[in-house]
Image: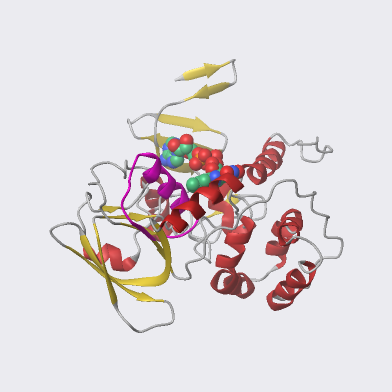
Amino acid sequence: MERYGRRLKLVDDEVLDIEERGGRVTLGLVNGGRIEADCAVLAVGNLPPHDPPAVADGRLPARIYVGDPWATPFEEGLAPGAPVLVIGTGLTALDVILRLVSHGFDGPIVAMSRRGLRPHRHVENLPRPKPVLAKPAPELSALVRWARRAARTTDWRLVVDSLRPITQMMWASADGPKRARFLRHLRPFWDVHRHRLAPSVADRIDALVASGQLCFEPGKIAKVSATESGAAVEWRPRGSDELKILHVARMINCTGPQGDLLRSSDPLVRRMLAARRIRPNALRLGLDIDREGHVIDGHGRASEHILAIGPMTRGDHWEVVAVPDIRVQVSALARRLVNAHWIAGEEL
Ligand SMILES: Cc1cc2nc3c(=O)[nH]c(=O)nc-3n(C[C@H](O)[C@H](O)[C@H](O)COP(=O)(O)OP(=O)(O)OC[C@H]3O[C@@H](n4cnc5c(N)ncnc54)[C@H](O)[C@@H]3O)c2cc1C
């Protein structure tokens, strides 16, 4: 345990359970210890990715299939020239590709996702986005039309960035079906326009594509099976019924952090779900919480003493993954906890 002054202790342990009793909480730790507190804030970050169903069914050995690239040295043990499949084409995939190459990997890499979209690039020296003064129309189709119109007269990045200060507010005012429609139809496009690449990183990815070492494929994996040298991946290109086969030495799951608590193997999440102390958000984006961040239990009641912040509250805030947004959320929560929220906020 590390102490910072009289008020902050850092405990190196894992919380396995949080129980609420008698107006207080008790945290059960993996080593058997317990911590009592007035309240607990779940700030557990992102949960590891889950295996795409077709891949989970294939039960591939760990030397062939890497389920969580953040927890595994995925570049180790690859023979020169061995083909690799990266599942996903977002920021995690690009990070993984660059790490492979920076370790001297010279084999072909296929990055596959349903649409094959990859993050766009930032451009340097853009002016600051102008704030959106009139809230865009609430209908998603109208919002897309608004963005396209606005992008005719300025760089599209400024249009996307101008929405950032009001994204949480727009999410909050959208009902469940609209949020679900956004996730189904717009999310992949939003993600690649919103979460962009530094120009130097985009240049490195473009150079890998130009050299032929890397290609992006829109498609869906239908089945995987182990072979002597790795895995045979049956997949369908987007918009086609044709089944293709790709032979790879390694597959790396880059589908990103998961939000569906029901598919999580995290011990704390599983235990709290089983005890009905938390419940999943309706859109399977982390925890269900109330407007002030109290977790909602399995009976639909807001907890008084267990709160949540960060990516696990994405279902309620959407734009709460990047550190600047989490900082604002943390500041508001801290002020509420010390009952100082009614005093004017300091600039963050
Ligand atoms: C590939 C990638 C790139 C990113 N790039 C950026 C970026 O450029 N800019 C940006 O702003 N954001 C970026 N993000 C997002 C950002 O890193 C995360 O959203 C942010 O770190 C979340 O902060 P957090 O404090 O909520 O969780 P984390 O930083 O994940 O911290 C969670 C902590 O909780 C601990 N913990 C979890 N469960 C338990 C338990 N049961 N008991 C005890 N401790 C536990 C973990 O060990 C960890 O210390 C990126 C994320 C990824 C995956």
Q: Is residue 319 visible?
A: yes
Name the outermost residue toward the top: 5
Q: Quadrant of residue 339?
A: top right
Name the outermost residue toward the left: 228
Q: The magenta stretch spans which residues?
A: 88-110
Viewer-side residue, 166 vs 341: 166
Left or right: 20 as drawn, with respect to 271: right
Q: Quadrant of residue 142?
A: bottom right
Q: Locate residue 138, reporting x and y percent.
A: 75, 72
Q: Locate residue 255, reporting x and y percent.
A: 43, 58
Left or right: 184 as drawn, with respect to 56: right
Instruction: Decide whether residue 108 is among the magenta residues.
Output: yes
Q: Locate residue 16, reporting x and y percent.
A: 38, 40
Viewer-side residue, 255 vs 258: 255
Viewer-side residue, 348 vs 340: 348
Quadrant of the rendering where the N terminus is positioned = top left
- Give above or below for 332 relative to 275: above
Q: Is residue 42 visible?
A: no
